[in-house]
Amino acid sequence: MSSDRQEYQKKKQFFRDLLTIYGRKPVLEALEDPKVNVFRLHLAESNKRDGIIRQISELAEQRGVEIAWHERKALSRISRNGKQDQGVAADLQLPGYRASSEISDATLQEGMKCYIALDGVNNPQNLGMIIRSVAASGIDGLILPRKGTASLSPLVIKASAGTAFQCPLFHCETLEPELDRWRQAGAEVCCLSSHAEVSLYSALQQASRIYVLGNETEGVSAAVEKQCNMKMKIPMSNGVESLNVAVTAALLAFANRA
Amino acid sequence: MSSDRQEYQKKKQFFRDLLTIYGRKPVLEALEDPKVNVFRLHLAESNKRDGIIRQISELAEQRGVEIAWHERKALSRISRNGKQDQGVAADLQLPGYRASSEISDATLQEGMKCYIALDGVNNPQNLGMIIRSVAASGIDGLILPRKGTASLSPLVIKASAGTAFQCPLFHCETLEPELDRWRQAGAEVCCLSSHAEVSLYSALQQASRIYVLGNETEGVSAAVEKQCNMKMKIPMSNGVESLNVAVTAALLAFANRA
């Protein structure tokens, strides 16, 4: 690779791994948190320049964060949510936020890694709670396909109690090709089913493992289920058939602490 | 005890252990569920007698459930929530709904029981999720002091995904005297603290155990903490300090499945 090409690839990766958040309160909180690296602040020219907008821009100046002013429409394109961005967005450079392609075959083969991947979890409260539990558990990360998963909106960041900035998060477009790759690299790609014979609490992990969780109503999609080479159940009593998805994620994430 | 007095005590206990729910949808769902024993249906005379009210009263008649009509104000006193009862309440007789006094010293000393008690959990979503997880886990029950805990409202029943009717639930007025009694009977009365030295996952249960969970902002009250003879932590990574209370309850409830 020429050094120009290398430079280009590096830049591309840098921008791909920026997390863009929006909304006045989440952006203010990110700027107030010294552990969060804010790369660039985006403001709509239509914003009144007093109150919280002044506070945000002053804080950005103090921290030496570049401020870009945009027309309202251009800002909507950046936030991808013109209805709720309140004229404010920010690109964050988080060490824990990366593309799922960084989970390489070698990474999986080196040790007993453990990840949770989401398929169609679109409720922001649940996503926030899942991020919080995954961060707390210390497992290797949460995989979030852009398609079908709630975006990292102000509601999600709030429900995560701010842990979204600390949690190892891996983004991808869709889950299937990644699961396929990981399975072929020898990983245990595992979905939950009440009909499974093996219990979560008896299935010793023998290789790196990726748990896939579907949404509460539909479960995992057929295409994703096809990529799984393992099925497990969480044993349940009293005729209960399923748990809240955020509760399930916590039980999976903490299962290897037990 | 004279047989009159025995009769009186039995009756008193019977009425004490009725669970009164309210709201059109929850009452309709209870009547539709053959596993739920509806003792009496209460309707406000102000209700229009068509649509869902007709459906509810017809279903009650089919099932041979007594129907009592009341003035609007009297119904509010029965539901204890005139603003949200929608003119409908029902007394349920659930085998799993009992007074915490039934957790006797002998019960605790017979075997390694496990309960969760709540102190100030007033968010209906969280309470519903906790009921669902406790029901699914198969632990011996959830203890709900009337004071400070969300009541078993339509929101709670919905968030429990209907498991409130299957879960072993123990009601009491306040928690402190019960915890005191159980501790003196030899139980491990245990609260969580991030400063505790013992981890949930290393503290083998050596007697019956009651975990006490406080609300998310305040934790357990000082009076309740005084009744605990054990402190534990759930080990956490990435600088996360606490988990959602419903997630914590699930980890505790399933800890002995692990």
Image: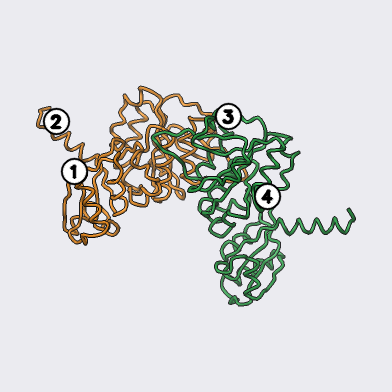
Chain colours: A orange, B green
Disc 1 with disc 3 on a shared chain: no
Disc 3: which chain?
Answer: B
Q: Secondary structure at mark 1?
A: loop
The mark found on residue B96 in the picture is 4
Q: Which residue is mark 3?
A: B203
Judged by depth in the image, the label closer to the viewer, 2 or 1, is: 1
Type of the residue with mark 2 = Gln
Q: Left or right: A14 with respect to B234?
A: left
Which residue is situated farthest in the top direction here? Answer: A110
**Picture quadrant where residue A50 is located:** bottom left
Q: Left or right: A133 with respect to A94?
A: right
Q: Which residue is mark 1?
A: A64
Q: CA distance from mark 4 to mark 1?
A: 61 Å
Residue A5 image point, x, y percent: 12, 32
Q: CA distance from mark 2 to mark 1?
A: 28 Å
Q: Which residue is mark 2?
A: A6
Q: Quadrant of the C terminus of chain B?
A: top right
Q: CA distance from mark 3 to mark 2?
A: 53 Å
Q: Left or right: B48 with respect to A144?
A: right
Judged by depth in the image, the label closer to the viewer, 1 or 3, is: 1
Q: Nearer the viewer, residue B42 or B5?
A: B5
